[in-house]
Amino acid sequence: MLASTSIPSSLHAVVACGVRKSYGIHEVLKGVDLTVDYGKVCSILGPSGSGKSTFLRCMNHLERLNGGILQVGGAMVGYRQHNGKLYEMRKSEVARQRADIGMVFQSFNLFPHMTVLQNIIEAPVNVRRIPKREAVGYAMELLSKVGLSAKAQAYPRTLSGGQQQRVAIARALAMKPKLMLFDEPTSALDPELVGEVLSVMRALAADGMTMIVVTHELGFAREVCDKVVFMDGGVVVEEGSPEELFNNTRTARAKSFLGKVL
């Protein structure tokens, strides 16, 4: 149970107000504030240990908050308010919320004993209760979109890392989410495979998908994103358009970080 604060506006796809997360005495998120509008792409940059991935995992309640408010699509994620207090939802309720939030991890997390097609239709059929024929049809559309129509009956072990990550993106999209979260989706890939994953993400952005991307791919952040956020020490240090963050950096910490990685 968390103490309640004022509930933020639902006019944005994502609203974070004072989000805190601790592991024992170690506070990872120290009051994160962020808004992301519908149909926009936001990248989160920062050094290792800055809280980027933890913040992303809080958005679909893979990590429980220790303070603050976090809304996705106008609803608090994982909590409901009653008599001025916030109470955690039941697992079944959280699962229904997660169905609207797609997440792609560093590791591909595909089921090794299932074919590509089976991986993609598993959640739509068993969580959304979509008829199998309909799920298969949509899965094939998604595989075409990510350039893998010929791999529908292949098993993950036969695919390259870039192909597996594209399957993971298709699997997340199969649930028809309102928001896509990407946690360093290219960090586990060989350099020559990065481009094929980023091209799929660029296409999603062009289609108007709301996306939050934790990444070290600064070219993607500069070219594709509407907002760029720099995190360090568990807080948002600076945010703005790519032009503002990369060309008119205001804070010394962000300037130092970008100076080392650009």
Image (cartoon, rainbow, N blue to C red):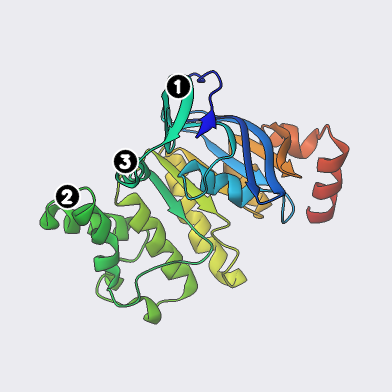
Amino acid type, mark 1: Ser
Amino acid type, mark 2: Arg
Front: mark 3 or 1: 3
Q: Which class describes the residues within 10 Å of circle 2: few (<14), some (14-19), or many (20+)?
A: few
Residue 132 x %, y %: 13, 57
In whole angstroms, how far apart are the C-alphas of marks 1 and 2? 28 Å
Q: Is mark 3 on a helix, strand or loop?
A: helix
Residue 54 x %, y %: 60, 49
Q: Which class describes the residues within 10 Å of circle 1: few (<14), some (14-19), or many (20+)?
A: some
The residue indicated by pointer 2 is 129
Q: Which of 44 and 258 is in front in this view?
A: 44
Of labels 3 and 2, earlier in sequence is 3
The residue indicated by pointer 3 is 93
In whole angstroms, how far apart are the C-alphas of marks 3 and 1? 19 Å
The residue indicated by pointer 1 is 10
Q: What element carries label 2?
A: loop
